[in-house]
Image (cartoon, rainbow, N blue to C red):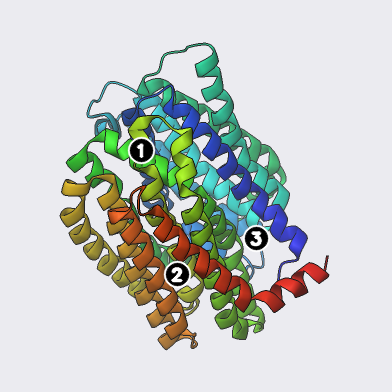
Amino acid sequence: MPKLHKILAYALGPIGSAAFGIVSLPLMSWHFSAADIGSVALLQTVAGLGILLFGLGLDQAYIREYHAAADKAALLKTVLPLPLVLAAFFLMSGNRWPSEILFSSSSRGLAAGGLFIGAFLLTRFLSLTLRMQERAWAFSFSQLLPKILVCLLITGCILFSLPNHTAVLFGIYAAAQTAAVALLLWQSRRTLAAAAKAPWCADTHRAALKYGLPLAAANLTYWAFASLDRFLLKQWAGLEQLGVYAMALNFSAVALIVQSIFSTIWAPMVFKWVNDHEHCDKIGGIALLVAQATAALICLVGIASPAAARLLPEAYADVPFILPAALLVPLFYTWTEVGGIGLNVVKKTGLIAAVNLAALAANLLLLYQLVPPLGAKGAAAATAAAFWLFFILKTELSARLWQPLPRRTLYAAATACLSVCLCYTLFGNRENYPLFAAVWLAALLWLAYRNRNRFLHFVRRF
């Protein structure tokens, strides 16, 4: 298993990114409108779609085959060119639909949005080479740099009273992401030089596509499932409500830290365990530890949620109540990463697509019922409930097809977290906040008592 110093190195990127994000978006809220912030949320969502459409699952194939590949440079050369060619062709073809989706206009921000999407795709593949080489500090700094630059550029806009329309905001994000690509090209220069000299293998390419394309289809369904809330919220409640929702998601970045660190480490580590035939019996225990740690995080954030209102304009008054439900999405995804990894191990990518479709259908139905009357609160509640279903289905299939897990405990914990957080999001207010805080405090104390020996053992090691 990774040593503590390496885990801390991988944690630097997500923790630093979350910290700068928590600073930059509230700063942004005092200079740019909620509608502009909502447009940025859609831009980032469309960039994620670009990785799926142009990547063809080859990034996942690279992760899956890296440790088994005899010539790792040849593997990179085999998987990298096609996504880059597809992305370049699309971005140079003059398509205007991304701008129309983001702005309801085809005339503003198109170049900056396209640059951001292209840089985002290139960042994905280049950062994978650092991750698989276990260059933890370089990997983390490449994640951290664009967040630092966004924060600095937003501060510059405020200090110098620069224009505050959407195209300026998109330009800021595009410039920051392009700088990250430049850094990654420098960090990966030797790897890329070796890949340029390596042979391109048609058999490896076919095998990578055979593994990656079904997974890309499954991930595309997952993207629709995870991103539907933003598009339907814009359609049914407007960009202002989307801006409020995006702000709550920003404050839930503390959970994204957990998700990002765990996702960065978990899948490559498990595939290495499977390849080496070791440690796979530890997965059930790890799943319980992750569930307890993330439940404690939910309690802490729920107790502290009113503090968010003090950092924002009055237009964002609903953010503290949306925050716990928004927090559940990355945390349930983290639970799913642990519980559902078996489907990737046994390569049942078709079942992954089926789970994603089921969760997508549930999310669509819930969003249809909750967003029109409740706006951002309804979107947060619907998406959290859909991710709960996603976790249950994927964990159940993984346990049946690969190896058993402590499912009853995991399912009970997930249901309890969902119930309390949704009640707070839908029915919470300043008057009944003390009741919810008492519930979260009681749960936190129980978790601390239950894990007291493990905590004391950890402290004694230092």
Q: Residues within 10 Å of mark 1 (few under 14, many from 20)?
A: some
N-term-proximal mark, 2 vs 1: 1
- Distance from disc 2 to disc 3, alpha carbons, whole Å, reads 29 Å
Q: In the rendered view, would you say 289 is above or below 223?
A: below
Q: In the rendered view, would you say 379 is above or below 457?
A: above
- Distance from disc 1 to disc 3, alpha carbons, whole Å, reads 51 Å
Would residue 432 be found to the left or right of residue 331 on screen?
A: left
- Distance from disc 2 to disc 1, alpha carbons, whole Å, reads 31 Å
Which image quarter: residue 163? top left
Q: Quadrant of the N terminus?
A: bottom right
Would residue 199 be found to the left or right of residue 333 on screen?
A: right
Any mark on residue 317, and which?
Answer: 1
**Closer to us: 395 or 215:** 395
N-term-proximal mark, 1 vs 3: 3
Q: Amino acid at mark 2?
A: Thr
Q: Residues within 10 Å of mark 3 (few under 14, many from 20)?
A: some
Q: Amino acid at mark 1?
A: Ala
Any mark on residue 336, and which?
Answer: 2
Q: Residue at x 48, y 88 (%)?
A: 404
Residue 345: x, y in percent?
50, 77
Q: Amino acid at mark 3?
A: Lys
Q: Residues within 10 Å of mark 2 (few under 14, many from 20)?
A: many
Would residue 232 be found to the left or right of residue 69 on screen?
A: left
**Closer to us: 289 or 199:** 289
Q: To which residue does mark 3 refer?
A: 72
Q: Residue at x 33, y 32 (%)?
A: 315
Q: Quadrant of the C terminus?
A: bottom right
Looking at the image, is mark 2 or mark 3 nearer the viewer?
Answer: 2
Observer able to see residue 92: no
Any mark on residue 222, and which?
Answer: none
Q: In the rendered view, would you say 364 is above or below 358?
A: above
Residue 6: x, y in percent?
73, 59
